[in-house]
Image (cartoon, rainbow, N blue to C red):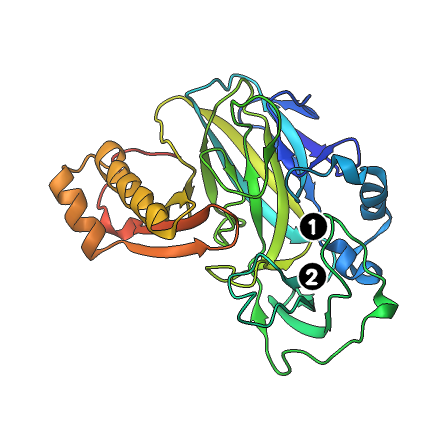
């Protein structure tokens, strides 16, 4: 079955996951959902990045209801049969650029904010989806503090400067934030990533990829948001190229295996994630869960897993700007002659 969930003031929740939210759609395992993911940065260039539907969300969701995080989340989707202890497999079928423009914001939470003279600067990019690249069309210094999520900038107050002349940035449409509801009373911020998913900010979570999320509450309550069209590992200045997307997902409830953190599968790789307030802590949790993947899922001995993690797995920094820092481990599928656990 194919369902469509549009982004409206009634179908989004701004800045949080919440296990008590009423689902906007109930689906079965194996169903496909076409969803709209709207960037909370559309107000950085309202003339280019906002249409009538986006304006309805920005004007229809009260500012005081945009907390404790910042991202516009579409959902949640209730998947029948999903129970705590299961895994929710989410296959991303398509991620289409909604309009041609996106924003990169050098933010106060960026990694080098002090070293770059506390300068808050916005760079607006235009995407060429046919040729899969983006180019900056102008930049401006933010007129004042980023005072609340979804602020709409008065563009006439901003001087448009030439930016990144001659540079083409490869497009990689993906979701910075997606996940299931944690088993926690009340709202959980969308800003830090965690076992439920959230703001992982891994550019590899795009069309053709599959994510496996541990389920914490009945129905899983899956939501999508924080759409990007390009981002580097690290997300150094605080944001990606933030741009709205139309997203297609197929969901399956998996009861045949378990993993404690969000697990990513691409055509060529498995990717394990780890998070911690300290980068060393994130690295340690990623390393431990990499060994867990290799021993519990790939059935290697601990000694073999530890050796393989060192000689063939690539550890990298996913992001350093979301409160809880993220690391990832890339495990090449080519290492395994046989798939000892078929997750298809």
SS for dot 1: loop
Q: Residue at x 61, y 54 (%)?
A: 228
Q: Residues within 10 Å of mark 1 (few under 14, many from 20)?
A: many
On the question of residue 1 being in view, the answer is no
On the question of residue 338 being in view, the answer is yes
Closest to the observer, 227 or 193: 193
Q: Any mark on residue 266, and which?
A: none
Question: Which residue in the rendered view is the most extreme toward the bottom?
Answer: 166
Q: Residue at x 13, y 44 (%)?
A: 304
**Location of residue 74 by image quarter:** top right
* Image coords of residue 206 (percent x, y): 53, 50
State left or right for residue 234 relative to residue 224. Answer: left
Q: How many marks?
A: 2
Q: Any mark on residue 102, and which?
A: 2
* Image coords of residue 101 (percent x, y): 72, 62
* Image coords of residue 133 (percent x, y): 60, 69
Pointers 1 and 2 in contact (C-beta within 8 Å): yes
Q: Residue at x 52, y 59 (%)?
A: 235
Question: Which residue in the rendered view is the most extreme toward the left?
Answer: 303
Closest to the observer, 190 or 224: 190
SS for dot 2: strand
**Location of residue 343 by image quarter:** top left
Q: Which comes sooner in the sequence, label 1 or label 2?
A: 1
Q: Residues within 10 Å of mark 2 (few under 14, many from 20)?
A: many
Q: Any mark on residue 39, and which?
A: 1
């Amino acid at each position: 079955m194919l369902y469509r969930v549009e982004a409206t003031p009634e179908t989004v929740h701004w800045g949080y996951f919440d296990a008590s939210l009423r689902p906007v759609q109930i689906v079965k395992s194996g169903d496909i959902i076409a969803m709209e993911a709207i960037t909370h940065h559309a107000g950085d260039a309202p003339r280019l990045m906002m249409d009538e539907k986006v304006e309805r969300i920005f004007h229809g969701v009260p500012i005081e209801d945009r907390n404790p995080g910042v991202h516009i989340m579409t959902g949640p989707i209730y998947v029948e049969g999903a129970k705590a202890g299961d895994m929710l497999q989410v296959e991303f079928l398509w991620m289409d650029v909604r309009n041609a423009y996106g924003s990169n914001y050098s933010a106060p939470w960026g990694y080098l904010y002090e070293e770059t003279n506390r300068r808050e600067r916005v760079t607006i990019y235009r995407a060429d989806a046919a040729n899969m690249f983006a180019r900056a069309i102008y930049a401006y210094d933010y007129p004042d503090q980023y005072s609340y999520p979804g602020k709409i900038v008065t563009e006439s107050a901003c001087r448009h400067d030439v930016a990144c002349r001659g540079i083409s940035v490869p497009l990689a449409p993906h979701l910075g934030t997606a996940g299931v509801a944690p088993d926690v009373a009340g709202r959980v911020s969308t800003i830090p990533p965690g076992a439920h998913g959230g703001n992982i900010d891994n550019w590899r979570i795009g069309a053709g990829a599959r994510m496996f999320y541990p389920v914490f509450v009945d129905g899983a309550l899956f939501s999508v948001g924080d759409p990007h069209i390009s981002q580097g590992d690290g997300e150094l200045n605080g944001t990606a190229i933030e741009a709205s997307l139309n997203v297609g997902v197929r969901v399956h409830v998996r009861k045949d295996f378990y993993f404690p953190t969000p697990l990513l599968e691409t055509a060529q790789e498995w990717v394990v994630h780890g998070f911690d307030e300290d980068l060393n802590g994130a690295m340690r949790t990623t390393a431990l869960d990499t060994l867990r993947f290799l021993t519990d899922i790939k059935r290697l001995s601990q000694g073999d897993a530890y050796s393989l993690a060192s000689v063939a797995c690539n550890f990298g920094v996913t992001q350093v700007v979301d409160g809880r820092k993220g690391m990832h481990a890339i495990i090449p599928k080519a290492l395994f002659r046989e798939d000892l656990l078929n997750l298809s």
